[in-house]
């Protein structure tokens, strides 16, 4: 088997810590340092300045591919076709969008391939700020389309909002983010066809505010158990 690493929103490879001012390795650098190494690495980002830094990090390495384009297009057309089950290749794909910038087709393609496992950030901040408002009538059509693109269809509406009878008129009640996240977990299994999707872990900022849910989705029970145990450890430590 050949194992490959895929980073859909790779960034520049490193960033500066806000607290210490020191350079901190990003996911591409971390992946390149993993032992034993992956057979190949694919880094994708849409910003040219970040791509330039990634290319500097990659240097002349023949096992690293760098793509400057929308990750939805690059993954579906260029990268995922290289990680086929029948070619004995297996991929670990990190999908860390800056917001609702990911197309459900990418998630579904990974799941249905049987050869690609994913870590996925479910962008709670963007959803709460722009889509899952207390009053659904205040959500713009543009923001609704962004959510539908990420979710895969408009079933999120009936999950996020329910109608309850009021004294004078019906009242739209907003569901908790935990309910929405659990419904998305169901979609990863039932629609995207991942066999194992452990309960996601909620990541928070330094003030305790929710940032995103981190999901892992796979077809192998061993991988799912390892990640489930890691998630459980962090929950028990009270870091989420």
Image (cartoon, rainbow, N blue to C red):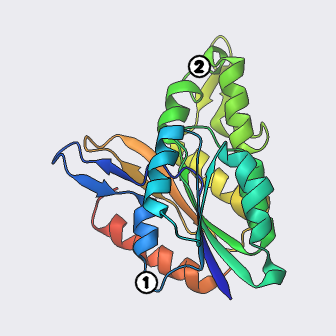
List x then y, in percent, for residue 155: 77, 40
Q: In this view, which residue lies farthest toward the right?
A: 86
Element type at mark 2: loop
| Front residue of this view, candidates 11 and 226 | 11
| Residue 162 visible at all | yes
Left/right of residue 223 with respect to residue 208 in the rendered view: right
Please tell me which residue is depicted at 72% across the width and 51% down the height of the picture. 74
Marks 2 and 1 close (CB-CB < 8 Å): no
Mark 2 lies on residue: 135
Q: Quadrant of residue 33?
A: bottom left
Q: Residue at x 49, y 52 (%)?
A: 213
Going by the picture, which residue comes out furthest to the top? Answer: 168
Quarter of the picture containing the N terminus is bottom right
Sequence-wise first label, 2 or 1: 1
User: In the rendered image, which residue does mark 1 sit on?
Assistant: 35
Q: Where in the figure is residue 67, as x and y percent of width and height?
A: 63, 51
Alpha carbon distance from label 2 to label 1: 49 Å
**Looking at the image, is 120 positioned above or below residue 158?**
below
Q: Residues within 10 Å of mark 1 (few under 14, many from 20)?
A: few
Q: Is residue 5 above or below residue 96?
A: below
Q: Nearer the viewer, mark 2 or mark 1?
A: 1
Residue closest to the far front: 60
Judged from the image, the secondary structure of the residue bearing numbered disc 1 is loop
Which residue appears at 80% of the width and 82% of the height?
A: 87
């Amino acid at each position: 088997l050949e194992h490959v690493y895929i980073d859909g929103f790779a960034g520049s490879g490193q960033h500066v810590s806000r607290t210490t001012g020191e350079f901190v390795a990003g996911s591409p650098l971390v992946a390149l340092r993993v032992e034993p190494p992956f057979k190949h690495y694919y880094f994708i980002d849409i910003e040219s300045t970040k791509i330039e830094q990634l290319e500097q990090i990659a240097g002349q390495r023949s096992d690293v591919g760098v793509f400057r384009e929308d990750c939805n297009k690059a993954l579906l057309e260029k990268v995922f076709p290289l990680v086929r089950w029948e070619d004995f290749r297996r991929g670990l794909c990190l999908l860390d969008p800056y917001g609702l910038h990911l197309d459900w087709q990418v998630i579904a393609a990974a799941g249905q391939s049987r050869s690609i496992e994913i870590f996925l950030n479910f962008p709670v901040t963007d959803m709460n700020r722009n889509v899952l408002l207390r009053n659904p009538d205040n959500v713009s059509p543009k923001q609704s389309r962004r959510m539908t693109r990420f979710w895969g269809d408009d079933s999120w509406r009936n999950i996020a909002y329910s109608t309850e009878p009021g004294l004078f008129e019906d009242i739209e009640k907003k569901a908790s983010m935990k309910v929405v996240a659990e419904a998305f977990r169901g979609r990863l299994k039932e629609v995207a066809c991942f066999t194992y999707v452990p309960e996601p872990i909620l990541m928070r900022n330094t003030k305790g505010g929710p940032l995103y849910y981190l999901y892992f989705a796979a077809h192998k029970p061993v991988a799912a158990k390892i990640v489930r145990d890691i998630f459980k450890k962090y929950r028990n430590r009270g870091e989420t």
